[in-house]
Amino acid sequence: MEATMRSLLSDNSRYVEAFRLFLKNSTEHQCMQDFINTKLPEIISSLGIEKPAIDVLGIGSGSGEIDLQMISKIQVRYPGIKVNNNIVEPSPEQILSYKERVAKAPGLDNVSFTWHKKTSHDFEIHVNETKQHKKYDFIHMIQMLYYVKDVSATLKFVSSCLSPNGKLLIILVSGNSGWSHLWKKYGSHLPLNDLCLYVTASDIQNELSSMKAKFQSYDLHSEMDITECFVDGDRNGELLLDFLTETCEFKKYAPSDLRDQILHDLKSPECSSTKDGKIVFNNNLSVIVVENQ
């Protein structure tokens, strides 16, 4: 690996820009919304029984779009009950976007919001040092377990934060996604540092099984248009390549042979298909719901 390659996470503004473009080009949020509309009401059906308030913890919540949709389902299921929503998010840009979203959203009078500008690891240290080991009825970690130092330790800590009958919802890329193929083949050639782990839902399911945790899994079909990645000089294409490889300015700094191999593989059936002249990346996700036993 050349010294000039560095993790996309080392440039927060570029990461946020690439992430927003990824959301625009993919069906990621749409498939999550479908899951929230069809499956989440049943999952949360026993969270707030005989409780004066429902405590929610979102870890790595980003700009809050999916959070607020889940909160609305909790409000429908438990009308009038107070919801205490705690958010752990390290990015100041994302927290600002979240706060702006809350300010514009109707129907949140019975919801309180507390933001913790921390990584999940720093939040865990803070909880342990202050001995404020609060219990939560619903915890969600959506597309964030790639960014923890120790997946096993994080899962154990978060599980310990669940109240009786509490639920932990995890969303990650599927083990059969294009991401999984890319990571297995090229992960060791990309500038991981300690900022990102190449972990899929299959890895998390194995970890939870070893913990003897009770969980259910759901598959979500998702795809992303990556056609622009193959257009020379296209800024959007370069940002999407950055996001796919977790590398800042990948096209500029990656060794030519690595760049050519990854671009070739991105077109392969293991990663993508061709639809209506577009190259569509397999962005399949899995939802894992852990129940406190």
Image (cartoon, rainbow, N blue to C red):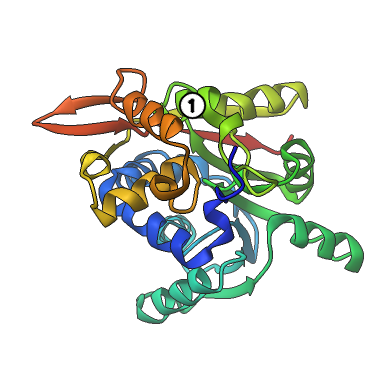
* Residue 214 percent across, percent down from the top left: 67, 27
Residue 220 visible somewhere in the drawing: no
Residue at 34%, 31% in the rendered image = 263
Is 127 drawn above or below residue 37 in the view shown?
Answer: below
Disc 1 target residue = 180
Is 210 drawn above or below residue 9 in the view shown?
Answer: above
- Say what amino acid the circle numbered 1 marks: Ser
- Quarter of the image for residue 82 reads bottom right
Position of the N terminus by quadrant: top right
Q: Nearer the viewer, residue 60 or 247?
A: 247
Is 57 drawn above or below residue 280 in the view shown?
Answer: below
Q: Residue furthest top?
A: 269
- Neighbour class for label 1 at 10 Å: few (<14), some, many (≥20)? many
* Residue 144 percent across, percent down from the top left: 57, 48
Residue at 52%, 28% in the rendered image = 186
- Quarter of the image for residue 196 reads top right
What number of labels is visible? 1
Position of the C terminus by quadrant: top right
Q: Nearer the viewer, residue 119 or 102?
A: 119
- Quarter of the image for residue 268 reads top left
Residue at 23%, 46% in the rendered image = 232
* Residue 201 percent across, percent down from the top left: 55, 30
Q: Nearer the viewer, residue 46 or 270?
A: 270
Q: Is residue 179 left or right of residue 7?
A: left
* Residue 282 percent across, percent down from the top left: 33, 29
